Image (spheres, rainbow, N blue to C red):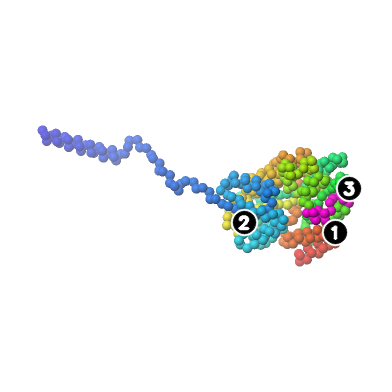
Amino acid sequence: MKKKILGLVLCLFMLTAMLGCVAQQAGPATPTAVPDAPKATDAPKPEEKITLKWALWDYETTVYWGALVDAYKKVKPNVTIEHTDLGSADYMTVLAAELSGTGSKFDIVTIKDVPGYATLVQKNTLEPLDSYISKAGIDLAKFGGITNQVTVDGKLYELPFRSDFWLVYYNKDLFDKKGIAYPTNDMTFEQYDALARQVADPTFGSEVYGAHYHTWRSAVQLFGVLDGKHSILDSDYGFFAPYYNMVLSQMKDGIAMAYTDVSTQSLHYSAAFSNGNVAMLNMGSWYISTMINSLKKGDYDKELCGNWGLVKYPHAEGVAAGSTLGTITGLSVTSASKQKEAAFDFVNWVSGPEGAEVMANTGNFPAMSTEGVRAIISGLEGFPKDAESAKALEVSNLYLEVPYADKVSEINAILDTYHKMIMSGELTVDEGIKSMNKDVAELKK
């Protein structure tokens, strides 16, 4: 009996063991998947912090520099833009010296003018941007042909972010006091000259100048290129003569302030116009934002110049109204930069649609100018509200003040030298033009 009980216990023990093995092989009846813990390498990496060094001028008085930096920071918070202000006087000369050798501290440089650009290209201090442009898929057609005018031997070394053109600024109060109709968007040079003489008052002690010309040669000489037939690269500069004669005659008659007075006083055009006794000023579109902001901040007296307007540049007979001079401001990546990809990203952003909107909202014209951009600028608080001022922003023909060419820096210097001598009376108009022709011809040999 004991043997039977013992056998039964053994059988039960063996059966229990067998069932345990089967259950162990089958696993749990309702399995629950437990995901692997994330590995440290799967976590997103923070973007590398980058500092880019940028050369520019007049940071404190130019509203768009800081606006561009602040807006880009929102897009690329990991990038810090450190600017160095080289000042506006002789900026391109100072920049060329800064970029000499291979130890440049700049990643990005601002290009102020074409002659300076030519010098930097010739010194191999700028990085060709073509491969970066191709990689980014940039459509250069959106720049309206401007980039074609600064392409060197098939290579582009800058992207323009600002494109300015010349207009006539006028003081409405001075015209109102004399009961004279305002300037229009379709004035010939003869009409412009007659209007300046009509509104002027050369009485000593209460002078009102019908027109004002800054010391730059572009304020006088380049009236002559508006026909689309001439440029500063010509060999015969006789086409300057009618405009020199017109301006010098105005100065002689007290219709415009004498060149020597403007020069010796180092009188800035903004000081001349804001003083309230200049009826018309030919100047670039960059002055729009200065007018708006200076009046808003109280730097300009509203009683003297707060009632102002804009019209298109005067034109020669047979030339379309809205024909004007243009300048571009661009950005380049230095060949010495060790962060070229990051530097180009900033250049691309500033010159693209995002940067264009920032520029327009500060009252400046981006290189990518559209009807929408013009609407933003004319809609800014402080912009003249008359319809003619808004129409003045429409350009029919835009000619670069200084087109790119070999030795353009030297040509520019020659023309500038004799411009000063003509305007100061050291040479007659004919003598000065003869000297220009001679020196430029020798340079081109």
Q: Nearer the viewer, residue 374 or 73?
A: 73
- What numbered label is drawn on residue 425? 1
| Precedes in sequence: disc 2 or disc 3 | 2
Q: Nearer the viewer, residue 243 or 31?
A: 243
| Precedes in sequence: disc 3 or disc 1 | 3
Residue that appears at 84% across and 40% down? 176
Quadrant of res 148:
bottom right
- Residue 295 coordinates in the image, percent (x, y): 74, 42
Stretch in magenta: 253-266
Looking at the rendered structure, the kind of residue marked 2 is Phe
State the CA–CA distance, disc 3 to disc 1.
Answer: 23 Å
According to the image, label 3 marks what residue?
A: 203
Q: How many numbered dots are placed on residues in this image? A: 3
**Does the residue at mark 1 contact the one at mark 2 (Cβ under 8 Å)?**
no
State the CA–CA distance, disc 2 to disc 3.
Answer: 53 Å
Depth check, mark 3 against mark 1: the one in front is: 3
Q: Can residue 43 be seen from the camera position used here?
A: yes
State the CA–CA distance, disc 1 to disc 2.
Answer: 42 Å
Mark 1, other Cα within 10 Å: few <14 / some 14–19 / many ≥20 = some
**Does the residue at mark 2 contact the one at mark 3 (Cβ under 8 Å)?**
no
According to the image, label 2 marks what residue?
A: 106
Residue that appears at 67% across and 55% down? 86
- What numbered label is drawn on residue 200? none
Which residue is situated farthest in the front direction here?
A: 205
Residue that appears at 66% across and 53% down? 85
| Precedes in sequence: disc 1 or disc 2 | 2
Looking at the rendered structure, the kind of residue marked 1 is Gly
Looking at the rendered structure, the kind of residue marked 3 is Thr
Residue that appears at 30% across and 39% down? 26
Q: Secondary structure at mark 3?
A: loop
